[in-house]
Amino acid sequence: MQRKPILISLAIATMISIASTAYLLWPRSEWSQDEITTLRGLWIGSLPTLAPDPSNRVGDDPRAAAFGQKLFFDTRLSSNGQVACATCHLPSKEFQDGKPLGQGVGTTTRRTMPIAGTAYSPWLFWDGRKDSQWAQALGPLESPVEHGGSRTQYAHLIDQQYRAEYQAIFGPLPDLSDATRFPAQAGPVADRSAHAAWDGMAPADQDAVTRIYANMGKAIAAYERTIMPSPSRFDRYVEALLKSDMPAMRAALSPDEVAGLRLFVGKAQCINCHNGPLFTNNDFHNTGVPAAPGLSEDTGRAQGVRQVLADEFNCLSQYSDAAPEDCGELRFAKSDDHALERQFKPPSLRNVAERAPYMHAGQFASLREVLEHYNRAPAAPTGHSELKPLNLSEQELGQLEAFLRSLSAEAQAAATTCLSCHPETNMHQAAR
Amino acid sequence: MSTLITTAAQTIARPRRRMLRWIAGIAGGIVLVIVALFGFMLFRMSYVPADLDLATTRLSNAGVYQVSYEPRRGPIVINQIHAWTIHVATADGQPVTDAAITVDGDMPQHGHGLPTRPEVTKNLGNGDYLVEGMKFQMGGWWVVDFTIDAAGKQDTVRFNMILK
């Protein structure tokens, strides 16, 4: 009986402790000023006006965008007449293909990346082996497993099919009619005869062809620059939050999605790499993603940075329109760090739920598998993983997944002047 | 008799003891609540030192140089490559105009560094130097170290910053 007071007060104290902890942990709709700043940073409204690409002087020319859009859907830009950029970058699928590995004339070793918002990225591809959208567009065209063609093939196609459009934007085309000087198939490609034909060309003729080739990339980039993400439910939530409009906040995201958002910017630390209005810092990270079975070892950024520094179409190259001072990312790129081993670029998380499978070789089939990977934080196959185990519960993983699903909203290309460019029709026509 | 006395003493002492027990119990409860809250706060906090010096002018580790930095395009925005101007002076404020300087940066809580390799690309005179290629790829606690070598004296200065 004498112990009763102690027991009662202990019970009260325990209840207060539980209640206050529950209060602090409970999913709240209020956000601190710091958190609001963070959320505003993720909001699509924080996306700055796209700065011109100094390496592409036609990047913001609508004629170039219209021309580039036609090229993007033209299956004649391939060795078998069946592969266009849009074969893997399907507008109906967020400009990707939903396959673990890209399928052109052959099979690639990486997952097709989405395009929306990549105009903001200083690095392209999973390993950043290109430093502009236009240089990126030129890689697959000469890849033996993607478009499989060669640059003289493409130059002849431009000369024969797109002469007026090309010349209106880039000036006169050289005379390519001499078939000995300009073979039908020639380029620095894997195909031996095309490569030998290229080596046999005069340097000035090689340069003339390469200039046409680079301009094709610049036109495609002018089109790709217009492909941007659209506002999602998450953006409507932040917009409502900034106006303190509680009903609109509740209408935009469910309590579970809000709880997931809180984890995203807090305990789960997703925001470390998936920051900014595109939910990516466009940098490179080793997150211990398992090796894809059947593929040779992939060193990611370690190899990619060497490639971009040596790339014939990089920002400092003769085909770039940029002055050296505009090429800071390339000039100060980190190339000598062992941490680059098996680093890959975090893709934008906008529309991520519509883009299974995940990771650079489609290693994970579902968002849940991705989240479980980050929760476990296994050691990297090579190099050093930056992850630490997150200790998230099943419920928390579910909340995070719910939040990621709120980032869906179809990516759209701004209306360009190419009204006749209906993707599917165009591809069928070209394929025929 | 002795039993009677004891009973009387107990009757007097009992209410006081009971009160003491109540006080001890409540005090214990409050302590428990405070400990629980404090533990929770610690759990919520990151491991950034509380007394972190965020000054943009600092003395180098061995006190040889006084160094200041200034981002050239206003406040630092994450994921944007940008340049800094740094000013190097001796401890007593005389500009150091012929220093060889190297730059490095790090996130102590993450075990990774800058996404770039910044460099001092120009001696602007009067102790000012241009640092190009600065970039930070995430918010949080960053440190940037400048190792300064002039007239045979080498010393490193460390700047801390919390980026959002």
Image: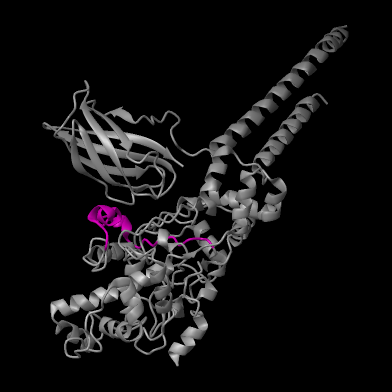
| Quadrant location, the N terminus of chain A | top right
Residue at 55 percent across and 62 percent down: it is A230
Towards the viewer: B134 or A132: A132
Q: Quadrant of residue A173?
A: bottom left
Q: Quadrant of residue A242?
A: top right
| Residue A326 highlighted magenta (yes or no) | yes
Q: Residue furthest bottom?
A: A432
| Residue A134 highlighted magenta (yes or no) | no
Q: Determine whether, in the image, residue A240 is placed left or right of residue A175.
A: right
Q: Position of residue A26 (x, y in %)?
A: 67, 44
Q: Main secondary structure of the magenta part?
A: loop
Question: In this rendering, does residue A297 appear at all?
Answer: no
Q: Position of residue A48 (x, y in %)?
A: 46, 52
Residue at 45 percent across and 67 percent down: it is A115
Q: Quadrant of residue A404?
A: bottom right
Q: Residue furthest left?
A: B151
Q: Position of residue B39 (x, y in %)?
A: 58, 35
Q: Determine whether, in the image, residue A254 is placed left or right of residue A222.
A: right
| Quadrant location, the C terminus of chain A | bottom left
Q: Is residue A317 above or below residue B67?
A: below
Question: In this rendering, does residue A116 appear at all?
Answer: yes
Q: Is residue A220 above or below residue A323?
A: below
Residue range highlighted in magenta: A321-350
Q: Position of residue A381 (x, y in %)?
A: 38, 65
Colour scheme employed for the rendering of this structure? one colour
Towards the viewer: A114 or B62: A114
Q: How many marks?
A: 0
Q: Determine whether, in the image, residue A388 is placed left or right of residue A166.
A: right
